[in-house]
Image (tube, rainbow, N blue to C red):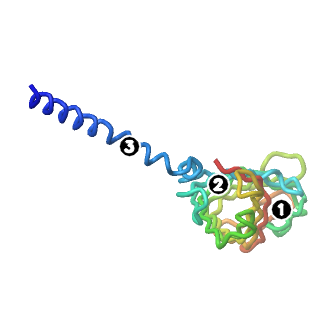
Amino acid sequence: MRIQSRGALKAVLASVALLGGPALADDAGERIPPQERERRGAVLLEFQPPALDASMYGIRLDISPSFDGPFSFGLMTRAGQWGNTVGVRTRFDGAELGEVKLNYAVGADARYTVLTLANGALRPFVGVTAGFEEFVARSGKGPSQGASTTAFLEPAVGVMWRPGAGRLGLTARGGPGFTFTDTRALRVTAGELKLRQVYPTASLGLLVVL
């Protein structure tokens, strides 16, 4: 009877050990701070409100492999209505001849954070955006007359400001832009608006890290 009892006891202990293995592993896993688990990856949403000259607005959606990792990759889109504003003058020669509307711009972008400062609150970065955009032009209040679809490339330097290295902040960027198209002239009644091959870019956006 004692031998049978000892055998049964060993079987019970072995079963408890086997069943307790996953639980012990889970307990060990719980030692990783919850914040660390949560921040293994991140989605960065950047909202660009209408510019100071009321020209463009847009949004960027980037994915970073880790919450505080240096790399992020994603997509962007923007649109806008330009009259005789700073925005249209930086993109076109002959801007006084008519109005231009940016129907859409879509593209892909990549960003690399060079370093972090002030305990993660400031993050200078370099990036690049490439894609396609479509403009239409008109004279006065008449219907659209000229149109052009172009490819663009926009390298940039900028900085992210995230107080307390948190989930909300601001992003500022600027740099040159390059236009690639065979049709640079948008014909309107008063003449032609010609796309500049090189133009300046600048934006300020609200950043949300998910």
Tags 3 and 1 touching, CB below 8 Å: no
Mark 2 secondary-structure assignment: strand
Q: Mark 1 points at which residue?
A: 88
- Going by the numbered disc 2, the residue's amino acid type is Met
Q: Position of residue 77 (x, y in %)?
A: 67, 52
- In this rendering, would 204 be left or right of 22? right
The residue at the point 56 percent across, 47 percent down is: 34
Q: Give the residue pinned by disc 3.
A: 24
Q: Residues within 10 Å of mark 1 (few under 14, many from 20)?
A: many
Q: Split into 4 quadrants, where in the image is the N terminus?
A: top left
Q: Quadrant location of residue 82?
A: bottom right
Depth order, front residue of 191/196: 196
Q: Which amino acid does label 1 sit on?
A: Val
Residue 135 falls left or right of residue 130 = right
Q: How far apart are marks 3 and 1 (CA)?
A: 64 Å
**Residue picked out by circle 2:** 76
Residue 87: percent from the left, percent from the top? 84, 62
Disc 3 marks a residue whose amino acid type is Leu
- Foreground mark, 3 or 1, reads 3
**Disc 2 + disc 3, Cβ < 8 Å:** no
Q: Which residue sits at x=77%, y=67%? A: 201
Residue 64 in view? yes
x 89%, y 57%: residue: 53
Q: Position of residue 54 (x, y in %)?
A: 87, 53
- The percent coordinates of residue 38 (x first, y second) are 56, 48
Q: Which residue is drawn at 15% across and 33% down?
A: 6
